[in-house]
Structures are given as C-alpha cells and as structure tokens.
Amino acid sequence: MRTKIKLPDQRVLLFVLAILLITAVAAMAVLLRSPSADTAAEEVGSENFKLVVDGGIYMPNENRSLVSTYRKEDTIRDALERSSIVRFDNEGRIASVDDTELHSELNWAVKQNGKEIPESGFVTRIQPGDEIMLYIEAPGNDGRPVNTLLISGGEVNSSLGGSYAHPYKEGTMVRDVLKASGLVTLSENGRTIRFVQASPDSQEGYMTKPSERWVLKVNGKELNDRGFDMQLQPGDYVELTLEKA
C-alpha cells in the first residue's frame, strides 16, 4: 500500500522562505555593527593632538594646522617625525619643514601647549589634546635685533624661496642684507640683481628672463631704484619677489 505525502501549499513555502531570509539579513546586520574586540578597543582609546606650523614673517606662506592621532608611546620628536613634514638632522635638530631649510641664523623652535621646549626636551611625551607648535626664531647675536630677508619666486617660480636673518647694526642698508645673505648676487656697481639662489649651497642661481623682474620691498612697501641705499631700522624685513615684468 502506498502512502501519499501531501506537499504543503506553495504559499506556505514562500512564507517560510521569506522568514528565513529576513532572519539571515538581520543576523548579518548585527555582525557588521559589532566591531571586533581589537577594533573596539582602538576606537575607545584613540584621541587627537594638534600640530601647528607658524612661519611668522620669515615664511608667511608656511602656516598650517594638522590634527594627528595620539599614541601613548609618542614623544614630541616621534609626533613631529610621524607628521611626515618634519625632518631631523643627525644631531637631533630640526633640519627642515616641508622640505624647506632655513638660513643658519634662523632656526625652528617648538612649544608644547605654549611652553618653549628645548631640543633636549624633544623626548617629552605628548598627551591627548596637546598643541605642538613649530615656529621660527631669529635670535641674532647675543639677543640683538635682526633684519630679515625673504625671497620668493611667487607664481613665476614657486620652487624658488629662501630666508635670512641679518644682525642689525646702525647704518645697515638694504644692500648690506642682500650681499651678506649669500643668496643674492649683485652687479659690480651694486645697483641691480644678477641672480638669486634658494640657498647659499645651491650650485646655480636664478637669472631673470626678459619678461620677469625682481621686486624689492621693505616692510611691504615697494622700493625704487635707489632702494638699495635705504637704511634699515631694527626689525625691518626686506622682501625680494619674482614677478612678471
């Protein structure tokens, strides 16, 4: 005798399949929302600190603020190196920021939450929420005031730039600062600029094309042809910018 098996109604099967599908989707969503133990711990423990770069009047284009992830083991030096914009020399001094080197009479200094940090203090650990500031100092000789030279290739040659701090003394002229910098070569009569270098160690200087000119300013005010003879005051800054003629 054969036993007939009665199959369930097609509508019942569809209903059961729908329930199973909904259950599977819900379970998958729970798994995706639940991070692993390692990930959860990382999210809870991670905090930020801020790195501020202030070029001041010496490098007015070098101003930025970066937010970095705090790591418990980081010292100030670790944090600066990990920023990828700061490079140290073999003696532990800051050699460059954004691949820009300063003249020997200028140097990068560091503050942690407004407090000056000497080079020996770069081993100090940072804390969550700290502000680490990089800024430029021009101490001069024995604390004397300085005159600063700022060189910029502007939009004509954005890769050309440099800076120099010249210890001030009474009677210092614009010409004195240009010549002493080692960055600017003047004509024999000292009235025109022959070429400009990005650093004293550069092999070649930049010579202007017929469609270009060097614009000379003191404290933002453009000088005329006699500007080379202008006597400077303590703290004055000289700008040399390449522009289209």
Image (cartoon, helix red, strand yellow):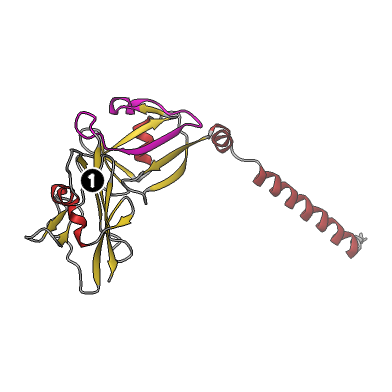
- The segment highlighted magenta reads 117-144
**Residue 77: percent from the left, percent from the top?**
34, 33
Q: Label 1 is placed on what type of residue?
A: Leu
Q: Mark 1 points at which residue?
A: 232
Residue 241's image quarter?
Answer: bottom left
**Residue 78: percent from the left, percent from the top?**
36, 34
In the picture shown, does residue 183 fall above or below 77?
below
Residue drawn at x 28%, y 47% is 237
Left or right of 16 in this view: 173: left
Q: Is residue 80 in the magenta section?
A: no
In the picture shown, does residue 54 fall above or below 156?
above
- Look at the image and tell me whether residue 2 can be seen: no
- Look at the image and tell me whether residue 174 can be seen: yes
Which of 244 and 51 lies nearest the eye of the viewer?
Answer: 244
Which of 87 and 220 lies nearest the eye of the viewer?
Answer: 220
In the rendered picture of this protein, how many numbered marks are placed on residues?
1
**Residue 164: percent from the left, percent from the top?**
22, 46
Residue drawn at x 40%, y 36% is 133
**Residue 160: percent from the left, percent from the top?**
25, 58
Q: How crowded is mark 1: few (under 14 residues within 10 Å), some or many (20 or more)?
A: many
Q: Is residue 124 in the magenta section?
A: yes
